[in-house]
Amino acid sequence: MIKNDYMPFSSKILEVIQHTDIEYTFRMEYQGDVKPGQFFEVSIPKYGEAPISVSGVGKNHIDLTIRRVGKVTNEIFERYVGNSLLLRGPYGNGFNLSDYMGKDLIIMAGGTGLSPVRGVIDYFFHHPEQRGHMTLISGFKTPNDILFRNDLKQWSANMDVILTVDCAEDDTACHVGLVTQYIPQIKMGNVTNTVAIVVGPPAMMHFSVQGLLGIGLLEENIWISQERKMCCGLGKCGHCKVGDTYICLDGPVFNYTKGKFLVD
Amino acid sequence: MGFHVNNTVLNTIFKTWQTEYNIYAPRKYPGGGRFSDTDCIRYGKINTAEEIIFDKKSEYSFKEFLTPVSQTLFFFTEGETKEADTLQKKAIIFLRSCDLHALKRLDDMYLHNGPADYYYHRLRKSIKIVLMGCDHSFENCFCVSMGTNQSSNYDMSIDRQADGTYLIDCKDADWEEQFATTGCAQQKVTPAYVTKNSITVTVPENLTAEVANSSMWDDYDSRCINCGRCNFVCPTCTCFTMQDLFYSENGKAGERRRVWASCMVDGFTDVAGGGCYRQKNGQRMRFKVLHKVLDYKQRNGYHMCVGCGRCDDICPEYISFSNCVNRLQDAVMEVKQND
Ligand SMILES: Cc1cc2nc3c(=O)[nH]c(=O)nc-3n(C[C@H](O)[C@H](O)[C@H](O)COP(=O)(O)OP(=O)(O)OC[C@H]3O[C@@H](n4cnc5c(N)ncnc54)[C@H](O)[C@@H]3O)c2cc1C
Ligand code: SF4
Ligand code: SF4
Ligand code: FES
């Protein structure tokens, strides 16, 4: 019997963490295997579905960090209190932690790009013995847009965390400028044993990868995560196709040797 | 086994089938054609053999049956979801060789590209196939170039003869017995197929995605009006968009559907915040054409396009897909020289 993958299941909202006016993390009841970087289709009847990355994985829950931008996400913000959401998934390949084990790890995140990699950061924060030196450069538009403030503070205990905003009034505690400006500050060890993950808007990913290649990282040691319109997550609706690749099935996480061809 | 039957015998057999099956075939819809005073030939339920149109190409393909224009997936009521029912009856579908090859593409997309699709599978498993022979090529067909002019994976084939009788080749054991008991003439039958089209198409051997950099695509920027009709008539196009529908403005009851989508039409790649890929129509043309004759093959090992020519038949701007494919060789050269 073939499974009906389109039927969503109802998942209880356990907790809501407000980061900014338009970005909340919804802690959802869920049991099952999930990898950071995978995503769920989240829906509310009448408004539709939206693909949302897993920003954290717990024993009986997953975190979904949602930015309020349109029809579905507005409605999620309007009526979440004490409620549940419809989910289906998880979809996509996600990050393979084994790709980064034993290596020096650089993570560059632009805006909400921090949510799909949050699970990776958290894992290596709790297991520092499984990696070498670790650097996180996390950029946001303004101080008001910063996500996961508490996590960022906590993580800096055993990794270099560079938090930067594009522009700010002068009273901010964080750096100012684009994430790419801080690449020279990364403490580099053996470059061939250094791996990187870059997630964010297309232009940010492009320039960040160029910067990392500039300091000697190998293409095969860089991973990116792509975002496309997705209506199914199952390799059927066609919206996410780029060339011969379905971002929802083959990605959204790609090694840069493959990811660099996914322009269109 | 092959048979030679007349209309009456065939209709008697159709009658027996209809207790268990609906029969879908290309038929005439008066006045529904592309031009105001013409008939439209498309798929629909038929009762008798005379209703089947053999002498014209159907404007739309059989895919409407397996992937309906709008398909309800499930219903919502207060706090509950309920799966939509499937059709009561099984189906017999009459189609030509190019379309039978297109069915393989639909199968590979819906059953093998990622997890098998529940809704496709439940329709697919209840169909039988009748191949309609082609004794001549229609306008814009290039099935021979695409290697789709002949098929043998049918349950039965049918060729209407000039005198109104039919030649049948039966592979389904039950149906064979049924024909045999009518006492009609038995003979060896090979369904008619064309060996030549007036249009030939050559996909360059050395075609790669680099051809996207050719200037040839710019020609389509203004010629194409991104109406998407080429996708809707194509038997191998499968894209859809999800849509939620509610029965009344404040009501709690509604349904989720999937509806046909087109990569030529605005909005296909739009993401929140205004992000959008392939804004120019020429880039969309390139995306569509290269899917049909390059990147589908990279994934599945054979070309997606079956050469039915329907996209050329329907285009209001007289844009020819086959002509576009034949321009690729020059475009490959152009891109090489620019390197
Ligand atoms: C793999 C993946 C992971 C994502 N992870 C997150 C996340 O963790 N947090 C977050 O806030 N957002 C994430 N997004 C973006 C999020 O899906 C969109 O912001 C959301 O779909 C907007 O829906 P809407 O109905 O509120 O907006 P509208 O603009 O009203 O949406 C209209 C339609 O466009 C589609 N759509 C719009 N934007 C996107 C988009 N970027 N990607 C795919 N489809 C889109 C929607 O499916 C919807 O049908 C992710 C997108 C993808 C593809
Ligand atoms: S090629 Fe023709 S049919 Fe297709 S979208 Fe353009 S104008 Fe419409
Ligand atoms: S691309 Fe055109 S010729 Fe090829 S299968 Fe589709 S409609 Fe037929
Ligand atoms: S999201 Fe539908 S094919 Fe990838």
Image (cartoon, helix red, strand yellow):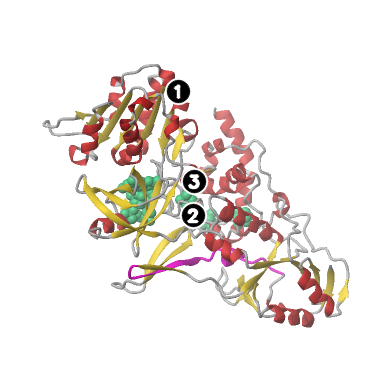
> Which quadrant of the frame does ligand 3 lie within?
bottom right
Q: In this view, does B174 lie to the left or right of B141?
A: right
Q: What residue type is labelled 3?
A: Leu
Give me the chain letter of mark 2: A
In the image, what residue occupies the spot 34% across and 49% down? A60
Q: Name the residue under label 3.
A: A249
Can you tell me whether the CB of the residue at mark 2 lies under 8 Å from the nearest atom of ligand 4?
yes
Q: Mark 2 to mark 3: distance in Å? A: 12 Å
Q: Which amino acid does label 1 sit on?
A: Leu
Which is nearer the eye, B7 or A148?
A: A148
In the image, what residue occupies the spot 30% across and 20% down? A184
| Image x and y of residue B153, in percent | 73, 59
* Span highlighted in magenta in the image: B55-79
Q: Mark 1 points at which residue?
A: A218
Q: Is residue B176 left or right of residue B318?
A: right
In the image, what residue occupies the spot 69% across and 50% down? B146
Q: Mark 2 points at which residue?
A: A237
Q: Which residue lies furthest to the top in this view?
A: A190
Q: What residue type is labelled 2?
A: Cys
Which is nearer the eye, A83 or B69?
A: A83
Give me the chain letter of mark 1: A
